[in-house]
Amino acid sequence: MKLSRIVSCCVLLASLVCGTGASAAIDPAAAVVKVRKSCTENGVALDNCFTSLTAVTDWMATTRKPNASAPLEVEIGPGTFGQTLIECSPGDNYTGHTSFEGAGNGQTIIKGISYNSPLTVYSCTNLSFSHLTINGTLYGGVLWNGGGTSKWSDVEVIGAARAWYEEGCDSSRGSHYWFGSKLTAIAPPMFGIGSTYQATCDESWFFGSEITISVPTNAYQVGIGGAVSAGGNGIIHVYGSVLRALVDGPGSAPAARVGNLGNGTTGGEIHIHGTGIDLISQTGRNVVALKASDNGMIHANGATYNMSTTGTKTRIVNTGGHVHASYLWEEHAEAPAITSVNGADMAVVTNTADGQPHLVIYSSSCASKWFDTVTGACR
């Protein structure tokens, strides 16, 4: 009898231990780990589970050290997680090679709580992020340093002043690929920056994505602005996407800007193809589509333009840069009331003396800014 009672007690104790998940552990060589708000589910403790991104990135740097031969997958559950630093050390055999997969855009959120960006990366290669939101409440979204490579799929980045910016270039230009993602920067009321994606070191590629700069009425005078901006070694490619500049407050925020970004940069390249460019102001502000200076280059064939404002509509500003972006405006009675550069715009007009449609070309020497190729005179 005593023996049966002892056996029963042992069975009960074992069930309690298993039920509370006391056997949960972290495998130092785990190929997949989890990040959850709680590492206990249905009374069971989860193996290879962390309750913060900081805890898992510290473990990656000190213990796991993912690399090309031993990559890591991090599954992040629903909830809001604090700002995160990923600092790789190539000399310490920790080079990145990690994928961070959220539970869904808007479900998994990495959120900043100070002027530091919600996500900061140093010297990492082959990082990937998917199905999550990065939200910077006071400044920035993603701060990337030191070259390397990354891939982003179904990621939303929201930042005050900036959504992505680069500091501390590597000797080799890094590369970043974005698929089906949405990036937004909102110009804040305390300083004049509104630059959604700013590349000064690396080369970035966008496919099927939306990049928006928003300048609300309470924004400070925006001096450094743009939906996509490139200077220095920065190169940006935008394919099959949307660039949006929503300008209701003061300052300049073009859809695309290259050259001097206010930090002494020169050069930079932006390539835009098969992309819609929206320039909208509900308060009648001036809008600019493409702006180049200081040997920066913009190539924007195959783009379309929607300019909606009672202020001036400028398609191209070129002060010492290179803009390759010819455009044909659809037929209307008159050519559009826009500002551009000599020879860059064409339009078909139907309000003509002979009743036939005429092709006109933007000419800075014409008072009307349009030269009629049929009459051979300024319109």
Image (cartoon, rainbow, N blue to C red):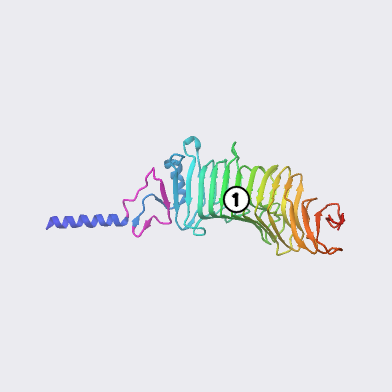
Quarter occupied by the C terminus: bottom right
Residue type marked 1: Phe
117 shown above or below 215: above
> Furthest-top residue in view?
91
Q: Position of residue 46 (x, y in %)?
A: 36, 53
Q: Residue at x 68, y 61 (%)?
A: 218
Q: Is residue 27 magenta?
A: yes
- Towards the viewer: 254 or 344: 344
- Towards the viewer: 317 or 262: 317
Q: Residue at x 63, y 50 (%)?
A: 238
Q: To which residue does mark 1 refer?
A: 206
Q: How many marks?
A: 1
Q: Residues within 10 Å of mark 1 (few under 14, many from 20)?
A: many
In the drawing, does residue 129 fall left or right of residue 185? left
Q: Position of residue 324 (x, y in %)?
A: 72, 47
In the drawing, does residue 339 fall left or right of residue 89? right
- Towards the viewer: 253 or 45: 253
Mostly what secondary structure, the magenta segment? loop
In the drawing, does residue 177 fall left or right of residue 3? right
Q: Quadrant of residue 9?
A: bottom left
Could one spot residue 116 in this view of the protein? no
Q: Position of residue 178 (x, y in %)?
A: 57, 50
- Towards the viewer: 69 or 200: 69
Q: Is residue 189 magenta?
A: no
> Furthest-left residue in view?
1
Q: Residue at x 75, y 52 (%)?
A: 316
**Numbered range of the magenta stretch:** 21-43
Could one spot residue 118 in this view of the protein? yes
Quarter occupied by the N terminus: bottom left
Mark 1 residue element: strand
